[in-house]
Amino acid sequence: MERKSDTPGDIDHFDRKIMDVLVGDGRVSVTDLADKVGLSKTPVNARLKRLMQDGFILGFRAVLNPKKLGLDHVAFAEVKLSDTRETALNAFNAAVWRIPEVEECHMIAGRFDYLLKIRTPNIRRYREVLGEKISSLPFVASTSTSVAMEAVKER
């Protein structure tokens, strides 16, 4: 029987527990993961491989400390485009990937078109990124910035 991989119903409580443990500690050993989930290593390893193959787990990465790296200024830029046809959206989407300071970019349904999370060392550098990079992205008509005072919850 072929498994579908695009709906939450395709995973059971063991799969969810595996993913919950991995979200908290992506470096956990398979032995420890098996202990925390309540299964032996072999089925946990098989489930882990399946969850990756089916696209439930996209990968593993290091979570860096932005403050230690001198990147503790976070701003959110609301971006309004002058054109929202598919060609303009695609051009904006491709160009925003080339700005390393943009940590996240979300298309929004609302009074603006995109919300960007930008991380820089300070407000001066943010102003440079906004003026030289973000404002020159394709089809940008206007931007509005909100500066984060404190991160209460980040993942």
Image (cartoon, rainbow, N blue to C red):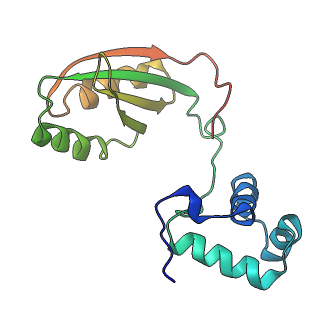
Q: Quadrant of residue 20?
A: bottom right
Q: Going by the image, does 131 lie left or right of 38?
A: left
87 vs 15: above or below: above
Q: Going by the image, does 142 lie left or right of 119?
A: left
Number of residue marks: 0
Query: Is 153 or 133 nearer to us in this picture?
Result: 153
Query: Is 84 or 54 nearer to us in this picture?
Result: 54
* Residue at image point 36% right, 20% down: 127
Query: Is 101 or 91 nearer to us in this picture?
Result: 91
* Residue at image point 46% right, 18% down: 123
* Residue at image point 70% right, 59% down: 16
* Residue at image point 32% right, 24% down: 130
83 vs 37: above or below: above
Q: Going by the image, does 105 lie left or right of 45?
A: left
Position in image of residue 85 (x %, y %): 11, 35
Quarter that holds the C terminus: top right
6 vs 148: above or below: below
Position in image of residue 101 (x %, y %): 41, 37
58 vs 34: above or below: above
Position in image of residue 88 (x %, y %): 13, 37
Position in image of residue 33 (x %, y %): 81, 69
